[in-house]
Amino acid sequence: MKAGNNKLPVSLLVASLLLLLLAAGLRFHNLGTQSLWNDEGSSYVQATRSFSEIAANAARDIHPPGYYWALAIWRGLVGESEFALRSLSAFASLCTAAFVFAIGRRLFNPTAGLAAAFFVALNTFSLYYAQEARMYAPLALFATASIWALTKVLSTQYSARSLRSPLIRYLLALALINTAGLYTQYAYPFVMLAQGLIFLIYWLSAVSFQRSATNTRNSELGTRNLNLVPRPSVLSTQYSSLTFSPICLPSPSICRGCPPPSSRSPTGRAPDNRFPRRRPSPPSSVTSPMASPIPMCKVQAATFRWNCCCSRADSSHG
């Protein structure tokens, strides 16, 4: 995952602030104009109770008590008007746009994060639930914040030296966010399922990348070692370029038992001219830098032995 720079350019910083101001204006505009409807009235009644009573009544409800606890604290701070009760959802929706910008910046670049936050700021569903005293805007906030914490966990290296390492902090933040989401809405387990799929895809891609890198490194080492060994094609090309011609040395004293050279054999037949009695031509240029020419002394010695054997064979036939 690609991490963005720590510092934003001034232009992008100004654009992000203007975008947050736009999102806040759209969410707080006419926030208290309409009266509370049925579900918002239930939220208000729950917020007027104590924490224990909220938990007891939430057990008979279809929603967990987390949002009602938060709304009860918020009501004690800002009041119980329509604007005051709905402002909690408006702030949650505004923070959702900010987390979307952080995720886009973390995964791609600040421009991508700004574009994604712009779409969230103008999203009609986000605007609708931001002006409702219910738990759906906080649900979107916890879902987005958990994805941001997961990206930080996956892009941070583990350090076992201290419990204050960044990875431990991000894991703790992810656990707290998931706990708050579970206490906010019963649909939050689907968000955790998405987190598990993201982690699985990331782990599989990391394992595949590691295997491909290992195979590439091994193939490079194997190719490097093979280059040090002469190939059969090079050897065949090298030795096929040499010319082997038999040599007949005229001195009969060198080989015992060899007949003296004469123009005709004892049988009266003409000498065998299939093998010219001349020295071999020098070897041609070697095509490979690893080639080494065969020593001429070995070629002459081998040819001399073969010539002697031919002369003995002619003498025996005669």
Image: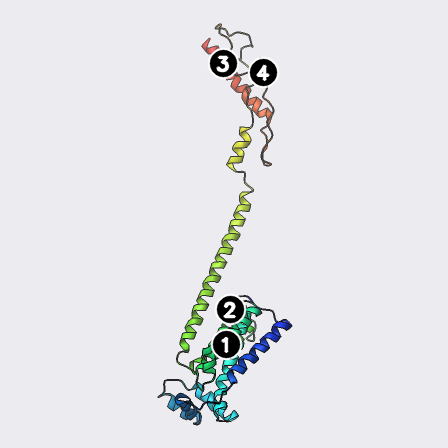
Contact? badges 4 and 1 (CB < 8 Å): no
What residue sits 54% from the left and 77% below the top? 98
Closer to viewer: mark 2 or mark 1: 1
Task: Using the rendered image of the protein, determine whether residue 137 is visible from the camera's viewpoint.
Answer: no
Of labels 2 and 1, earlier in sequence is 1
Residue 140 position within the rendered picture, expressed as x and y whole percent measured from the top left: 46, 78
Of labels 4 and 2, earlier in sequence is 2
Which of the pair 310/50 is nearer the observer? 50
Mark 3 highlights which residue?
312
Distance from label 1 to label 3 (Cα)? 108 Å
**At numbered mark 4, what does the secondary structure look like: helix, strand or loop?**
loop
Give the answer, above or below, for where 35 lies relative to 172: below
Contact? badges 3 and 2 (CB < 8 Å): no
Task: Using the rendered image of the protein, determine whether residue 191 is visible from the camera's viewpoint.
Answer: yes
* Dot 1 crowding, Cα within 10 Å, few <14, some 14–19, many 20+: some
Residue 218 position within the rendered picture, expressed as x and y whole percent measured from the top left: 51, 51
Of labels 3 and 2, earlier in sequence is 2
Q: Which mark identifies residue 249?
A: 4
Of labels 1 and 3, earlier in sequence is 1
Distance from label 4 to label 2 (Cα)? 83 Å
Mark 1 highlights which residue?
122
Of labels 4 and 1, earlier in sequence is 1
Closer to viewer: mark 4 or mark 3: 4
Mark 4 residue type: Leu
Mark 2 highlights which residue?
154
Mark 3 residue type: Arg
Q: Which mark identifies residue 43?
A: none
Closer to viewer: mark 4 or mark 2: 2
